[in-house]
Amino acid sequence: MRKLLSILNRFKLIIVFVLIFTIASFCSKYFLTITNIINLFTQVAAYGIVACGMTFVVISGEFDISVGSVMVLAGMVAVALINTVGWTIAIIAVLILPFIIGILYGILVVKLKLSSFITTLAGSIFFRGIAYVITGDGTPLIPDNTIYGKLATATVWKIPVMVIVFISYVILTQIVLKKLSFGRNIYATGCNFEAAKNAGINVMFYKTATFIICCFSAVLGGIVLTSRLNTAAPTAAEDAALTSLSAVVLGGANLNGGSGTIIGTFTGVMILGLITNSLNMLGINNYIQLAVRGVLLVAFVMMERYSKMRQTT
Amino acid sequence: MEKTTQKKSILKVIYKDYTMLLVLVGLFTITAVIEPVFIKIQNLMNIFRQSAIVGCVALGVSLVVIGGTFDMSVGATVSLTGMIAIILQDSCGVVGAMLIALLIGCIIGLLNGFLISSINGGSGESFMITFGMMNVVQAVALIITNGKLTGGSKSAFYQYIGNGDIGVVPFSIILFFILAALMQVFLTKTKRGRYIYYMGANRETARLAGINVKSLRIFVYMMAGIMSAIGAFILTARSGGALPKAGEGIEFDVVTAIVVGGVGVNGGEGSILHTVIGVLIMGVMANALNIIGVSSQNQLVVKGLILVLAVCVDKVKRK
């Protein structure tokens, strides 16, 4: 019995995934079509990319709740610069952006030892404010150039580019985290900060690096999002932090750092996407979906803590 | 010898407690010099009116923060309870509707507190759980109204909460100051109030010392819920209508005000006086920026900067 439980525990995510998938296929005949499966991936791509970056921050033992604002800011900067000064400067600016924000967070959180929650909360207010300042009066920016809108929606063999970007990003971050010493050091930093420091790991560097990676993911996600919508609105992506954190926690990461995997996060992202997609199919309105996502986040945090508490006692 | 050390410590306390008061006075003077419109009675009362909403919510959240955790769900609670208080006025009467709204705020707090205390969560867990609850409560508010605006209250009594004056002073700010005084007395003069400090300083020690930490945690979240409902009354009475997202972002304002006022984010420190100062600083600043012509959306930049700055100052002081 105990063995069965432990097996169930290990594969619970996959089981949940298969369960929802099966129910959804039975409930709607449109669910199990290639169009809808591609659609599902398209819907989760932007937040999925962000969730990959969030995994790094959570493993190192911190949070980043400013991802939504950074997404918006990145989209804004990209569109505004493309409209005014052209592609080259826009690309350079967008590539520099995550380094500026990440290093800033690194200084505040690691050097000054501020709580990452308060710091990124302030960041999320600040960067959304900057996004509003860029628009001037709060109206969304629309790219003059039609290429920008096609960046993400173009297809290769019928698969949208953004889905390819998403999947490649998942694979890339998985390799960084699991196969490189860089990734192992991030785990060590999150698992036991003092021990990692004493072992000669440059903890300051690794924590800052996770913030940069997370901001980079948010920037990439922001480009995908604004390209898909072909507009950059300062009000977009408000639920990005909620969704990506839920996916990471659902994927089995510990909120106190030291554990979590990209594969877990990917499964979490897909489960959340699946829920949204199937609720949409069943014609359930957005507000109820918001409630469902909120309940899920609370439930995942509770489950994760409960299983930890059972292990320790 | 003893006297001098005592004197020194008093000076130290004054320095620690009143740095933010000095900032408030400084901010006030500078704005008054730059823009004389600022010190007109009408404008000052306007600041009070605006501050009362965030202020009431901040009083409740202060207890949570002093107790060592966070509450992100207050903004959504303001939205929901404010709407309930207006919608139910036709069927339950004004007082009935307000009581039900208070009860709902209380239930949301109870849920928050129960969930967090049952997993013995620290500040990280409290943040995640109330973040989830924020979305649930917001969703309920949206579902009830189907996302539409509800009209304002017709009751003169209800409108008085938001717009009424006693002499020239708005009723809402008097309500806020009375509640603040009560809260301060509760925190410093009662056993339960002091237990909140112990719990915030070290939860495990407090538990071992025989304090019922579980019920105390539920209590602080319930207070946050109730105070959010009171803030919601002022908000919806003032604005003459309730948007299902009216309270959105209040949690940011509240946390900023609390931290700016000097209530430490690690728990076990600070007082209601700090919160009141923080609320007034944020109110004066928002008003000053409005007068200068910075839109409320563009003010987000300043708010974010101030929050970071306040946490840095808090950290330096602790060293």
Image (cartoon, coloured by chain):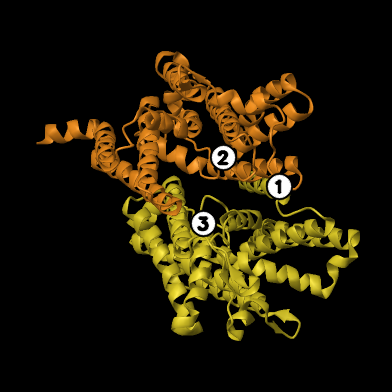
Residue B188 appears in the figure: yes
Disc 3: host chain: B
Q: Nearer the viewer, mark 2 or mark 1?
A: 1
Report whether mark 3 lies on the same chain as mark 1.
no
Q: Give the residue at the far top of this rendering.
A: A180
Alpha carbon distance from label 3 to label 1:
33 Å
Report whether mark 2 lies on the same chain as mark 3.
no
Residue closest to the eye, A9 or B204: A9
Residue B65: give its label.
3
Q: Position of residue B18 (x, y in %)?
A: 70, 60
Q: Which residue is mark 2?
A: A68
Q: Secondary structure at mark 2?
A: helix
Residue A138: give its label.
1
Residue closest to the eye, A57 or A150: A150
Disc 1: host chain: A
Instruction: Say which quarter of the image contains residue B32.
Output: bottom right
Q: Secondary structure at mark 3?
A: helix
| Chain letter for the orange part | A
| Chain letter for the yellow part | B
Amino acid tagged 3: Val
Of the image marks 2 and 1, the number of the one nearer the N terminus: 2
Q: Is residue A33 left or right of residue B105?
A: left
